[in-house]
Structures are given as structure tokens and as C-alpha cells.
Image (cartoon, helix red, strand yellow):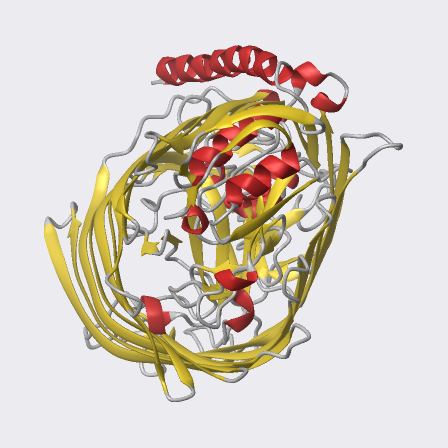
Amino acid sequence: MREVQDNFLSVLAAATLLAVTPAAAQTAATPAAQGATSFAIAPQPLGAALAQFSRATGLQASAPAALLEGRQSPGASGSLAASEALRRLLAGTGLAGRIEGGAILLSPEPRAALGDTVLPTVDVGAATGSGGRWPSRGFVAEASAAGTKTDTPLIETPQAMNVVTRAEIEAQGSTSITDALRYTPGVVSQYGATDLRYDWFTVRGFTPPIRYLDGLRLPFGARGYSQPRIEAYGLERIELLKGPASALYGQSSPGGLLNMISRRPSQVAQNEVVLQYGSHGALTAGFDSTGPLDAEGKFSYRLTALGRRADSQTQFLDERRIFVAPSLTWRPDAQTSVTFLAQYQRIASDGGGAPQALPAFGTLWANPNGRIPTRRSLTEPGYDHYSGEQLMLGYAFEHRFDSTWQFRQNFRYSHVDADTQRIQAYSFAANQRDVGRYAWGFPEVSDAFTVDNQAQADFTTGPVRHRLLTGFDYQREDATYEESQLTLLRALDVFNPVYGLAVTRPPMANRISQGRNQAGVYAQDELRFDRFILTLGGRYDWATARTNNYTVAGSRTVVTKQDDGEFTGRAGLVYRFDNGFAPYASVSTSFQPTNGTDRRGSPFEATTGRQYEVGLRYQPEGSGIYAAVSAFHLTQQNVLTPDSSDTRFSAQAGEAESRGIEFEAKASLAERLNLSLSYAYTETEVTQANRNAAGASTLGKQLPFAPNHQAAAWLDYSFSAPVVAGLGVGGGVRYIGASYGDANNTYRAPSATLVDLALRYDLGQALPALQGAQLGLNALNLFDKEYVTTCISATGCYWGARRTVLATLKYRW
């Protein structure tokens, strides 16, 4: 498999180099956007006409399919200035356009307003070249896919939301979901950005075990090892809905819900090839191509692919990755569309996919023998290994019956096969040098299918406008997890390791087979009266699970059945002032099934959550500015705690609270300046808990992975003449406050301040033949700070990612 992946990476790299040369030559022969250009664009769908206009002028042209859908261009012919040709192309389409900063800006003409809703200005350029239905301007998102399951503007969503756009992902050099969220308030990466298998993080003190892709729940597995890792290059945006989200999605963490949006086909042709090289020999090659397949614009496609090969800061740990995501959209008429989405990914990693946890003495605490090197590995070369393979197939169907009713159905089948074998530490000797180790293996396979049916009605009753959403969704997941016996190995001197021990995988100790179902019906009404927006939503879920736990030693299978039914809801009120301010208030609830049984053998009930939140947003229409501040009080009940009658078992008498204030501001101004600011104050506490057998209790303790303070700032600016035309500079500072890694608050990782840097240069500014080519440099943790991200036990500490530098050559046409 290594040879196949290396060959795939080589092919991608060769394709990148071959694609740049002819495309650059084509651009060089293209007349400049200034002055007169000869146009011969026939009447046709607007998307196809804009694609021809882009090729003739060299201007970047791309737009959300929803904005172009159903619009016909009368064409443009003759020797014309680019601005005049654009005006003619848009005549009669209901859209107006202007050229700014090498891109096209589209906005509806005043008469193009739909009812009382006026569409926002859309940047038809590189920043919005996804073909997605939710427009954004640089770092600033306009609407939400996750907050209401409708095209509701962010400013009208009655719950805190954070959106990371494609432009922000690229500007900050993010190569994973963990990286992309590092400037988002209230989000903490539990183990840093060093895990190659999974993205681990907490939101407002709680861990969301279930994530969503394109609004559909992803598999998780019986023990969480067969959850997929979503490739950041294949995403258009990342959305985080803060607080309980069960009113729309069913079982979920009370802290928040993560939804990722895939890149989708566009009706405007655009292509991109990327080559990247960086720290630890990291080599990445990728391409993204999209556009119409026919003159009528009924079919459009997208193909995104990436290959990566790299070592890491940890000895013996490497990565080989293949990602391919084809998609196809069919629009038989203006009222109907269906998009077929698929993706395949395989990750292979010698070294187990992630660094081993290290002792607290030598990382978190002082050790007389010195600090344990950040490169130190506790494994035996050749034993630790991880392989993860995932396949997803699905579709998104939409049909509008009339001006009132529309129907959507989203479906996906997912298969995840993960196999891991690792050596880990379990003790640290009194000499504070020798680490006791064990070897084990734990493969897990999961198959899941999810379907979500939505009916939406937009209508008016008297002075009140309604957007009524009703839906039914269902998911089935079957997972099998196997765990080997633990084989104890000889101790390793962590300061002077001697490797070479022959280790074989231990035999299986137990197998867990689990089948889970979730079915839910929900309804939501967004009522608009004057400047008020009242959102009311409710949902009832049926969640069942059957777990078979087979133990080899006793040749015995224990069967546990769980059956949870729960009603959850949300109510929120927003008021929109004309000046762009919008205060809001909301209350929302959640539920999350809990595995296991009490001392009587009865399955645990689901934990429940309730949040009260107030906030204020500011987003003047068309300004490219978005700011929000929120205050929340979140309570989780039915939390597991030791049973006071028999502390060998657990009881659901625990309770935890999280409260705080979050602030976020983003701005994308004049096509040259992008800004992101954030701050979060989070106070967590266990408010109810019993004592364990030793008499200790977590009562009054803070929740793990929840620092009291976080802050981040990013500034990105592109220069123009007479300074250095084409030069872009970006930089950011992140502060991560101190936090505990365990429930007893024994291990407290200190705070850390990290600096990131980004440089880029538009090569077309220096050589017209290279129009569309860009050279970039990103450095994460610029000053190479050594810091501990978290410690979960005496032998469970993790170093954060050291300085990582990536050089990128990108070409778009």
C-alpha cells in the first residue's frame, strides 16, 4: 500500500507541474482586463457566460450555484471594455456586477429582491469559488447551513455560531480541522495538532463525540476509533453551532455541534493545482477542478484530490495519505437539483498515527534527569502502526414545488475501517527514567447510513412571515471493536532509549459488536414580524442500542440493550436594527445516550443539557464586517458519578456547569484586508458528585480541557502598488490558558502563547506569463515554543506541535 500511495503522490505532483505550464501560457496570451477586448459570448446560461468572460479577461470568476441558477445571459460581442462586457452579460438577469481587485462582485439589482428578502453582495472570485450555496466574503460568512437547516443569515440565528471559511483556511495554512479551529473562541484541541488519525477538541468544556458532514451525522464506532477524519482540503467551510443542538439534530453534546461543508460543483469553470513542501519532509500535491459539463448548465462536476507523505516531530511516526472526492450536480430544471457526493480516503502511519503519551515528570513537572525530548518515542520500531480507510457515498436532493413549498432529502452511506497497534506507557519508575510499557491492538470497523428528509414552507399569515421546517431523519450504525490482551514489555529508559525488542501483536481479549439506531421527527418555525425574528423548534427522538461484549477468557457474551426517548427544544428571539446590530436571547436543550449499566444491571439514562444564552451581533449589510458577543450558562445533568451505595459502580447523580462569555470579530475589507479577533472566558465546575472508594470526590473541580481564558488575533493584508504589488502578509497570535487534563484536577497544563506567520506573493504581478500562480509560506508556532498541551495521567502527557513551516505553490485558472 505504501508503494501505491507514493505513486499516487508522484502522479499528483507531475500533474501539478504539467498543468501550470500550459495554463500559464494561455493566461499570458489573454488580453488584460483593462482596455478593449474582443468578445464573442453567445446567449447562454449565466454561469457558462461568466466562464467565457473569465477566460477572455483573466479575471477570477466563480459563484454559488444558487445565485446563478436559472439565470440566462444575453451574451456580449465586439471590442469592449471588460466593465461594459460584464454589464451586457448581466443585462436582464436581475444581477449587477463590478470589477474590483482582479475579481468580479455580483449583487442583485433593487428589483431583484425576493419578497422582503434582499440577497447579499457576492464576491465572485477565489474566496467564493466553491459552488456552495452559502456565500461568504473572505473571512466573513453571510448565512448558515447548520444553525437552522435553512438559508438563514448568521445574524438572525438565535444561538452562537462560528464559521471558518475556505479563504480563512487557506490564509492560515490549515491542513486539518484542528488547525482550522485554532482561532475560534471556546474551542480547545485536547492533544494539540499532532494526532494524524482524529481531530480531538472540546467546546465550552464538553467533547462533541459526534460530528456532521453536509448536515448528516458521521459514524463514531463502538469505542470511537472508527470515526472518520475529514480532509480539510475537501471542505468549503467549517461551522460550529455552540450549545445544545438536539432540537434539530437529535443526540449531541451540550457544548456544541460541528458541521463541515464539502466543496460542491460550480456552474462556473475553475481549476486549481497545489504543490506543498515543508517541515519533516512533508510533501503534498493536490488539485481541485469544477465547472459545467454542458452548454445548458444542467450538469456540473467537481473533482478534488490530494496526496500527502510526511514524517513528524516524533521519532518513527510518519504519514501517507490519499484523498479523492468526486461530485456531480444535475439540474433538470430550475426547480430541481441533485448532487451526488463521494469521497475516499486512506491514511497509513508507521508509529501508530499519533505520538505516545509521556510521563508527567520530564514534561509537565521537573525531572532531575532533564526534560524528555519532544521527539522521544516509546515504541519499538516496526510495531506501532495505524491504517484508516473510509468511503462515503451520498446525495443531496432539492425540489421546489411552488413559491411556498420545497423538499430536501440528504442521504449518505459511510464505511470506516481503522486498525491500530501501539505500545504505551503505564508506569514510571522511582528513578524517573524507566517507563513500563505494554503492547496492544484495537481494530474497529463501522458501517452507517443516514437520511434526513426536510419539507420547508415559506408563507405569510397577516403581518407575520413564516419559514416552517419539518423533518424526519434516521441513522443506523453497526460497529465491531476488538481489543487484544495487553503484553507487558521490558522498561525503556526514556532519556537513553535502547530499541530493538521484537514485539508481536497479542491475541484478542474481547470483541464488542454494537448496533445503534436513531430516528427523530422535528419541526421549526422562524417567524418574522417587523424587525423581530422568533425561532421555535422541537424534536422527539427514539435512540436504541444493542451491545454484545464477548470475552475470550470466559467464552461469554454479555448483552446490553438501551432504549432512550427524549424531547428537546429551542426558543430564540432576535431583533434586527437598521444599523446592523442584532441582540438575541435563546434557551435550548440536548440529550446524549450514556453507555453502561448501574449496580442493578439497568442501562443508564441519557444525560441532558440546558443552556441559556444572550448575545449581540453586528453585521452591516454589504460591509464585510461581522462581530458577535455572547454570554451563556450551560448545565449537564445525569452525569456519571460513583454510586454512594457501592462505589464499585456508577450512578447518575452528577451534574456539571459551564458558563462564560465569548467574543468574535471578523472583517474582509476592500479585497485586501482580512481580520479575525476572538476571546473566550469559560468557567466550568462539577456541581454534584459522590465520593469514590478512596473518599475522594470531583465536586467543585473544573472540567478537563477547559481553560478559563483564550484569546487569538489574525491580521492579513495584501499590498498594492507602489509598495510591492502582489505581496500578502499575515500573522496571528494565540493564547491558550492553563487547563486540567483529568477530572480530579491533578495535572494542570500551563498556558501558552503561540505566534503564526503567513507570506504569499502573486507571481503574475512580476511575470504576466504566470498570471494565476501564487507562492506562499506558512509558519505555525513561529518561535518553536515547547509546551505541554495536556496531561491526563501520570504517564499521559502530550507535547504540542513544534514549529511547522510549509511552502506552497498554487496555480488557479
Classify 561 as above or below 499: below
Q: Residue furthest right?
A: 722
Which of the 4 quarters of the picture holds residue 774?
A: top right
Classify 29 as above or below 342: above
Classify 670 as above or below 587: above
Of residues 59 and 786, the one drawn nearer to the viewer in this rendering: 59
Classify 623 as above or below 316: below
- Residue at (59, 78) in percent of width and height: 576
x and y percentages locating residue 584 in the rendered image: 56, 80
- Residue at (42, 21) in percent of width and height: 382
Q: Say left or right for 628 vs 654.
A: right
x and y percentages locating residue 773 in the rendered image: 64, 23
Q: Say left or right for 393 vs 146.
A: left
Of residues 287 and 34, the one drawn nearer to the viewer in this rendering: 34
Quadrant of the snapshot with the C terminus? top right
x and y percentages locating residue 29 in the rendered image: 62, 14
Of residues 45 and 782, the one drawn nearer to the viewer in this rendering: 45
Q: Say left or right for 441 vs 128.
A: left
Which of the 4 quarters of the picture holds residue 244?
A: bottom left
Of residues 133 and 175, the one drawn nearer to the viewer in this rendering: 133
- Residue at (61, 30) in percent of width and height: 313
Q: Is residue 375 visible?
A: yes
Q: Residue furthest front?
A: 78
